[in-house]
Amino acid sequence: MRPVCVIKIGGGLVNGLSRFWPALREMMADTDVVLVHGGGPQATEMARRLGHEPEIVQGRRVTSDLDLDIVRWTMRGEINLALSAQAQGADLRAVGLAGADGGLLRVAKRPPWIIEGRSVDFGWVGDVVSVQPEILRTLLGAGFLPVVAPIGIDEAGQVYNVNADTVAVAIARELRAVELLLVTESGGLRTGPGPFDKRIQTCNQKMFDEGVDAGWIEGGMRVKIQLALEAIAGGVKDVWVAGAGDITDRANATHITA
């Protein structure tokens, strides 16, 4: 039985993957891979073109009725298709799907959260209840690369926006993946913007807590590292935050440890 690696790639990287696809093809010689993608930049751009300013709270998108339409158009449509097509161009047999397909990602509507003293209703955002991986195992067994858009479904058939990092972690845990790679534009965890920032080689729970308190781990990266630590606690052996060209050579990546 071949090992499984789950890779999550940010939407901002969709048009900058010239080094990614050859590295992925090399990896897939002896490893099954599930590719999960985000799409925040495209969703935000589409919203603004429609005269709508999206609300982001601590790196998480509030999803109104319009935002949910935008998520469907960009993530299940534009981005999923683009990645599947690029993979085909790199001689990889990709199949695009959403978490709603085949009952892959069962979710429940997120209840309001209390954040900084106020109640935040995230709208059509789903929290993962379960992963039903049969469709992924079928595709992997036939030599395909599943490309998964982060859209889940509840028992009534309602679709929800789901954080793509959350989806990647849930799938990695369910498939007992040996590795989870979180591919970002920054290429790893950094101490902050500016001339004196530096890449962090290894980040554990203690460093994460200190970074959040100090303010240099925030926003989407805060969510990413928190979920990476949850993946390790859930049995995923190796978790990395890496650039698109660093999925095989991890010299410039950040290793997340317990």
Image (cartoon, helix red, strand yellow):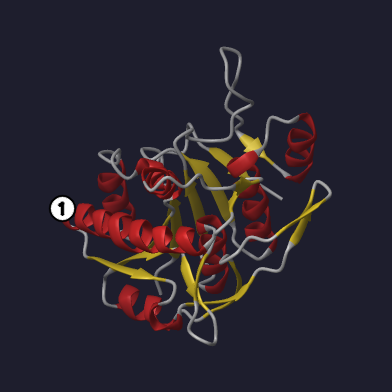
Q: Name the one closer to the observer, 153 or 65.
A: 65
Residue at 58%, 21% (x, y): give it. Answer: 193
Q: Name the one closer to the observer, 40 or 195.
A: 40
> At numbered mark 1, what does the secondary structure look like: helix, strand or loop?
helix
Q: Which residue is mark 1?
A: 89
The vertical placement of 22 against 92, above or below, is above
Where is residue 177? Give x, y as percent.
51, 65
Question: Please, which residue is most extreme toward the front here?
Answer: 51
Residue 218 figure quarter: top right
Where is residue 60? Give x, y as percent.
60, 51
Task: Identify the image quadrant of the N terminus.
Answer: bottom left
Question: In the rendered image, is residue 123 in sight?
Answer: yes
Question: Please, which residue is most extreme toward the right here?
Answer: 117
61 left or right of 213? left
Where is residue 92? Give x, y as percent.
21, 59
Residue at 66%, 65% (x, y): give it. Answer: 234
Question: In the rendered image, is residue 32 in sight?
Answer: no
